Image: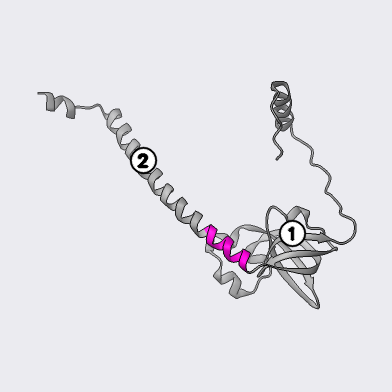
């Protein structure tokens, strides 16, 4: 009799248990995929650090364009993952000596790269990791206007005594 009561669960209870099991399985899979991708990222960072060099370059142009439209050689486009070919990447055209080359810039430093200025950049292959010395005056971009939501959040944080977020 008791065995029959255990197996006579309601349909919503069975659905909830199945969903809970599926979510637990998804969490485990995502955990291991995350660990694998983090290890791969660390290997790539170590490779970039080992191959970095400082060069002097004249920045001709910078913009964000789709990877396949950036002007890279076909062999580079073929090596890129299919999903990243359609993504927009920060591209910098620069003149190093007599040669004009196309580079991919790091997202963090893309806004700080001046156009039509000579800089000393840290590069690794075709990837710009940093900008060291900038010759001439540095033009900082004007601060962006804050939208209603950001202004409200800052006011509330100020009233609460919290430090504002710098993003």
The residue under the point 67% across, 67% down is 52
Query: What span is colored magenta in the figure?
Result: 41-50
Q: Which numbered mark, 2 or 1, is in the foreground of this view?
A: 2
**Which sits in the foreground, 112 or 43?**
43
Q: Residues within 10 Å of mark 2 (few under 14, many from 20)?
A: few
The residue that disc 2 covers is 24
Q: Position of residue 35 (x, y in %)?
A: 46, 52
Q: Position of residue 124 (x, y in %)?
A: 66, 67
Task: State which quarter of the image contains the C terminus.
Answer: top right
Q: How many marks?
A: 2
Q: Please tell me the numbered disc located at residue 85.
A: none
The answer to which image quadrant residue 77 occupies is bottom right
Main secondary structure type of the part rendered in magenta: helix
The answer to which image quadrant residue 20 occupies is top left
Task: State which quarter of the image contains the N terminus.
Answer: top left
> Residue most toward the top?
159
The answer to whether residue 118 is left or right of residue 49 is right
The residue under the point 30% across, 28% down is 12
The residue that disc 1 covers is 63
Judged from the image, the secondary structure of the residue bearing numbered disc 2 is: helix
Is residue 48 part of the magenta span, yes or no? yes
> Residue most toward the left?
1
**Which sits in the foreground, 32 or 74?**
32
Vertical placement of residue 54 versus 98, above or below: above
Q: Position of residue 34 (x, y in %)?
A: 47, 51
Marked residue nearer the N-terminal end (2 or 1): 2
Is residue 31 part of the magenta span, yes or no? no
């Amino acid at each position: 009799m008791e065995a029959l009561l255990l197996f006579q669960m309601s349909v919503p209870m069975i659905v909830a248990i199945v969903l809970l099991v599926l979510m637990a399985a998804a969490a485990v899979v995502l955990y291991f995929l995350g660990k694998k991708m983090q290890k791969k990222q660390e290997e790539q960072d170590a490779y970039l650090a080992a191959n970095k060099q400082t060069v002097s370059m004249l920045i001709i142009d910078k913009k964000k364009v789709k990877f396949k439209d950036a002007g890279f050689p076909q062999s580079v486009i073929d090596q890129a993952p299919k999903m990243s070919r359609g993504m927009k990447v920060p591209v910098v055209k620069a003149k190093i000596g007599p040669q004009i080359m196309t580079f991919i810039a790091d997202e963090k430093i893309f806004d700080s790269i001046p156009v039509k200025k000579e800089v000393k950049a840290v590069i690794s292959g075709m990837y710009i990791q940093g900008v060291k010395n900038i010759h001439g005056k540095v033009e900082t971009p004007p601060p962006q206007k804050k939208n209603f939501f950001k202004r409200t959040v800052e006011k509330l944080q100020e009233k609460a005594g919290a430090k504002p977020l710098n993003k």
